Image (cartoon, grey):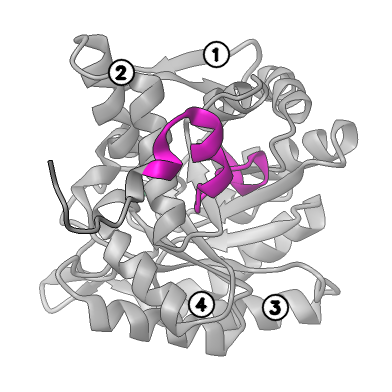
Amino acid sequence: MVTFPIVRMRRLRRNETLRRMVRETVITVNDLIYPIFVVPGEKQRQEVPSMPGVFRLSIDELLKELEEVAELGIPAVLLFGIPERKDEMGSEAYDENGIIQRAVRAIKREFPQVIVVTDVCLCEYTSHGHCGIVHEFHGGFEVDNDSTLEVLAKTAVSHASAGADIVAPSDMMDGRVKAIRQALDENGFSHVPIMSYAAKMASAFYGPFREAAESAPQFGDRRGYQMDFANKREAMREIELDIEEGADIVMVKPALAYLDIIAAARQQFDVPIAAYNVSGEYAMVKAAAKMGWLDEDKIVWEILTAIKRAGADLIITYFAKDVARKLKTPLWS
Ligand code: PBG
């Protein structure tokens, strides 16, 4: 028999009700943003092979999806467009009748209460698949920062005039938050917030997304503009600059392998922080669950709780509908 005094930590773990009472981190439906891929055409509902349960939807199907999103109480969706045509300059990105502009108008007409966030980037729209305008440079190529800013700003304004509630630049050009803020303000959209992909790593976790969005670069890679994933101080600097330039919400991406970055950002900055639980993180869970190697529901809950515990206020996740459904079940988690 032990005779020394023991600090009894286990007292409050004895049953689920006690555990619920002292739980420090709780996921709610308000934390969730659901990413959706939109394609041209009608009656299109194409499952992404590496992302089971995720579909590329034409606008008619998108509206059905939104009905479910609204009913589940998910507050926001993040839209990615796959255009009719791609060109060198990514011109469908800012076309008034581009895929995203039409999708936003359709959603806002029928579901005005759902917050529509639009991804502002060129990689889905350029024939070369890079996130900006490509110029020849010393016999090679380079994504030209400053000429890209103009196109991004035009794109953001076109999204806002279609009715987007938040614009989310994901290109990683320098100065784009400022350029977009200025263009929005000049065009009567000073009320539209910017959620910037502030610390976006050059990551292999985006693989399945590039299949879904047909946005893999045709040559080279994105390491010339996305961040080296080895760098935490640089991530803080990127976030700081985006806040200075006017970002309302800053994002860390991917999420799971970057919880230290989320935690450091939470310590250092007072703006809302979003974390993107990206396509590769989704695909890994789905693959292991399909093999019967992991319990999907439990793993998803654990992962999202960890992302929130690290300091994220908002979680962008392909699991949003599943989680929202579970949250409707009393006492689940
Ligand atoms: C770029 C963009 C990417 C993602 C979101 N926006 C891909 C990239 O940078 O190559 C990735 C999201 C995911 O993997 O789920 N427009």
Return the disc, 3 or 2, that comes first in the chain's sequence: 3
Residue that numbered label 3 is attached to: 183
Residue type for callout 3 = Ala
Circle 1 SS class: strand
Residue 235, image x, y percentages: 31, 77
Residue that numbered label 4 is attached to: 176
Of tags 4 and 2, the one toward the viewer is 2
The answer to which of 284 and 138 lies nearer the viewer is 284
Is 3 covered by the magenta stretch?
Answer: no
Return the disc, 4 or 2, that comes first in the chain's sequence: 4
Is 25 covered by the magenta stretch?
Answer: yes
Residue count near mark 3 (Cα–Cα under 10 Å), binned few <14, some 14–19, many ≥20: many
Residue that numbered label 1 is attached to: 45
* Residue 295, label in figure: 2
Magenta range is 11-34
Residue count near mark 2 (Cα–Cα under 10 Å), binned few <14, some 14–19, many ≥20: few
Please tell me whether residue 253 is drawn above or below residue 271 in the rendered image: above
Whole-angstrom CA distance, mark 3 to mark 2, is 47 Å
Horizontal side, residue 85 vs residue 172: left or right: right
Residue count near mark 4 (Cα–Cα under 10 Å), binned few <14, some 14–19, many ≥20: many
Residue type for callout 1 = Arg
Residue 150, image x, y percentages: 56, 75
- Tags 3 and 2 in contact by the CB under 8 Å rule? no
Horizontal side, residue 214 vs residue 80: left or right: left
Please tell me whether residue 195 is drawn above or below residue 85 in the rendered image: below
Horizontal side, residue 203 vs residue 111: left or right: left
Residue type for callout 2 = Asp
The answer to which of 79 and 199 lies nearer the viewer is 199
- Tags 1 and 2 in contact by the CB under 8 Å rule? no
- Tags 4 and 2 in contact by the CB under 8 Å rule? no
Return the disc, 1 or 2, that comes first in the chain's sequence: 1
